[in-house]
Image: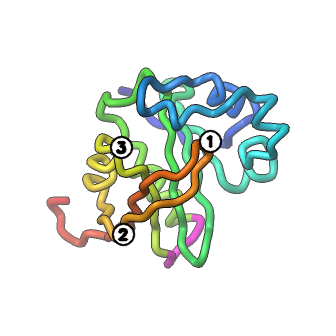
Amino acid sequence: MGEYLVTSLSEDYAKEICRWKYPGDYSVYNYPDWSVVVANNFGISFKETRDSEFVAILVNNKFIAYGRIRLSKGKSFIGIGLTPSYCGKGIGGSIMKLLIQESKNRFPNCTIALQVRSFNKRAIKCYKSAGFKIIDKYIANALNGKDEFIYMEYIESNSKDN
């Protein structure tokens, strides 16, 4: 696939994310137009937040994914978004490894965690393969109303075959 590069998430990349459109059930991950993102003070619209919490992931100078790593309640929470055309292509695991390493660099000794909608079996499978374990399931408010989420934590494996 090429070599991955983790870099800062520019405003241009953030605007591009707002143009990504996921199909069907995955449309819950669609950002609104950039003007709506800015008007509603989404974190991605602030340079300071992009610089401190977001990263862009490029392959061969092409922007293919982003990650968000933020500290909350003493844990490092990871979020990930792939360009729709790259979803389901088997690269999520590689990107998760990059985000786990970035999380360890930024917040050493913190538990790495994530939240995912329970319907997103493709992502849950990817996260399990990357070393995350399901800890809890709950209903929470989301932009599109209430939804069921799964809370997962990264379990460092000491075995060489993982």
Q: Residue 66 at x, y = what percent?
A: 56, 40
**Element at label 2:** strand
Q: Residues within 10 Å of mark 3 (few under 14, many from 20)?
A: few
**Amino acid type assigned to the residue bearing label 1 in the image:** Thr
**Element at label 3:** loop
Which circle's residue, 1 or 3, is located before the other in the chain?
1
**Amino acid type assigned to the residue bearing label 3 in the image:** Asn
Q: Nearer the viewer, residue 92 or 158?
A: 92
**Element at label 1:** strand
- Residue 120, label in figure: 3
Q: How is the image coloured?
A: rainbow
**Residue in view at x 50 percent, y 66 percent:** 104
Main SS type for the magenta part? loop
Q: Number of numbered discs present? A: 3
Nearer to us of marks 2 and 1 is: 2
Horizontal side of 52 relative to 68 (left or right) equals right
Rounded to the nearest angstrom, the CA distance separating label 2 from label 3 is: 15 Å
Rounded to the nearest angstrom, the CA distance separating label 2 from label 1 is: 32 Å
Q: Residue 154 at x, y = what percent?
A: 37, 66
Q: In this figure, which residue is indicated by the disc labeled 2?
A: 136
Q: Which residues are magenta?
A: 106-110
Which circle's residue, 2 or 1, is located before the other in the chain?
1
